Image (cartoon, rainbow, N blue to C red):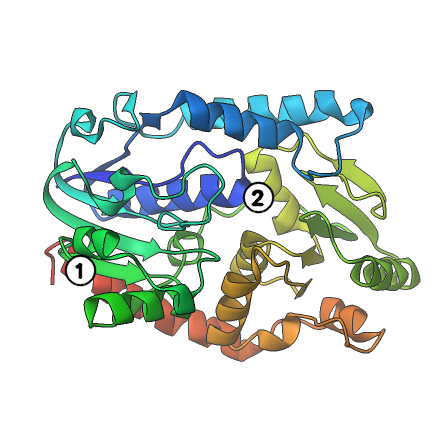
């Protein structure tokens, strides 16, 4: 089939890039002609670039780092150009995307009404798309809480989908309340269709992925690394408590760095995902924006103990970083892949 994948594929964000690439690669491995729908919006581009250079607002980026964030953005742009894409079309004119047998919306927070620049864009709810079938894979409402519900106009649009799956229980509860039927929960594409392995040799390094970590969490990770003889390497963002800053890392640099690391310290969803993909011990802490998806991912796979709370014992983070992942995690991921495959069989008409 000719499949258009609709997601946030041009975000200067490692998780957004890799979930888009992995989903398209996975569909192509199934024998389909899958491309990313290459939507464009001047206002979105401007917002994305502001965030790329000032990711920790209200804390301003230091002048010494502006060039490094610029290099990071350029590496992302080069990576975007290598992705299988449709012709470019305006985000507000979905009919110009072209004709497809199936448009698959997701993964990522495509239905997040609180997203700072993609909030409530009708295209992600299927409006105006020219497709024989419309489905969603691992879509999410992000930090839009299930208790807040969905407006009837958006519910009507979602009711036109032929098949829907989500990646978290919060999104499942929202749709169950709105549509009267709970959708399947499937794996993020990076876990369902993992990136190709690397040949990076292991290093005595711990990857730090994220920013704005609580001081107590950063201090505990720093203390453990010094005692255990590991270097902390911050990828993509500045964290002054790390030994090295690799702010300019591109998407492939990120993949290789995680693969070579001994463990992962993160407060980002895809930090946890890439730790799981590479079977790396990890410790994570939830931010307000990412708390829903971090709690759901770790709970669903049986890794909730790796999400550290503020009242954790001082040595807890070090214990997690030194302890290999439990064997049951691989079993949980394998079972989830089977469920996700079954959903894709249904959505693609292959069941």
- Quadrant in which the C terminus is drawn: bottom left
Question: Where is 238 relative to 291, above or below?
Answer: above
Question: Where is 49 relative to 244, above or below?
Answer: above
Choose top left, top right, bottom left or bottom right for residue 121: top left
Q: Which mark is residue 255?
A: 2
In the picture of the structure, the residue carrying the numbered disc 1 is 345
What residue is drawn where x is 51% and y is 79%?
Answer: 328
The residue at the far left in this view is 132
Question: Where is 179 relative to 95, above or below?
Answer: below
Q: Position of residue 183 (x, y in %)?
A: 25, 68
Q: Which mark is residue 293?
A: none
Whether residue 50 appears in this view of the structure is: yes
Q: Are marks 2 and 1 in contact (CB under 8 Å)?
A: no
What residue is drawn where x is 84% and y is 55%?
Answer: 230
Secondary element at tag 2: helix
**Seen in the image, is 235 located left or right of residue 230?**
left
Q: Position of residue 39 (x, y in %)?
A: 32, 28
């Amino acid at each position: 089939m000719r499949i258009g994948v609709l997601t946030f594929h041009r975000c200067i964000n490692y998780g957004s890039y890799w979930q888009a690439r992995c989903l398209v690669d996975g569909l192509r491995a199934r024998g389909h002609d899958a491309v990313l729908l290459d939507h464009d919006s001047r206002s979105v581009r401007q917002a994305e670039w502001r965030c790329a250079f000032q990711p920790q607002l209200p804390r301003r980026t230091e002048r010494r780092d502006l060039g490094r964030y610029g290099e990071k953005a350029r590496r992302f742009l080069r990576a975007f150009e290598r992705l299988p894409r449709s012709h470019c079309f305006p985000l507000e004119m979905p009919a110009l995307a072209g004709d497809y047998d199936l448009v698959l919306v997701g993964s990522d927070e495509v239905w997040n009404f609180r997203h700072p620049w993609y909030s409530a864009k009708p295209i992600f709810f299927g409006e105006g798309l020219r497709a024989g079938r419309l489905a969603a894979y691992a879509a999410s409402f992000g930090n839009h809480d299930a208790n807040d519900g969905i407006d009837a106009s958006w519910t009507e649009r979602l009711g036109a989908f032929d098949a829907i799956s989500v990646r978290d229980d919060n999104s499942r509860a929202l749709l169950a309340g709105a549509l009267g039927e709970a959708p399947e929960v499937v794996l993020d594409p990076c876990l369902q269709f993992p990136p190709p392995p690397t040949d990076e040799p292991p290093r005595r390094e711990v990857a730090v992925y994220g920013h704005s970590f609580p001081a107590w969490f950063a201090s505990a990770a720093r203390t453990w690394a010094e005692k255990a003889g590991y270097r902390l390497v911050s990828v993509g963002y500045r964290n002054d408590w790390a030994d090295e800053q690799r702010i300019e890392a591109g998407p492939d640099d990120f993949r290789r760095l995680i693969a070579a690391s001994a463990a992962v310290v993160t407060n980002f969803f895809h930090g946890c995902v890439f730790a799981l993909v590479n079977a790396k011990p990890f410790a994570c802490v939830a931010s307000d924006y990412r708390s829903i998806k971090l709690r759901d991912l770790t709970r669903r796979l049986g890794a909730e103990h790796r999400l550290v709370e503020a009242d954790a014992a001082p040595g807890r983070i070090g214990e997690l970083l030194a302890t290999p992942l439990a064997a049951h995690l691989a079993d949980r991921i394998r079972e989830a892949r089977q469920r996700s495959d079954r959903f894709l069989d249904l959505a693609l008409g292959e069941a």
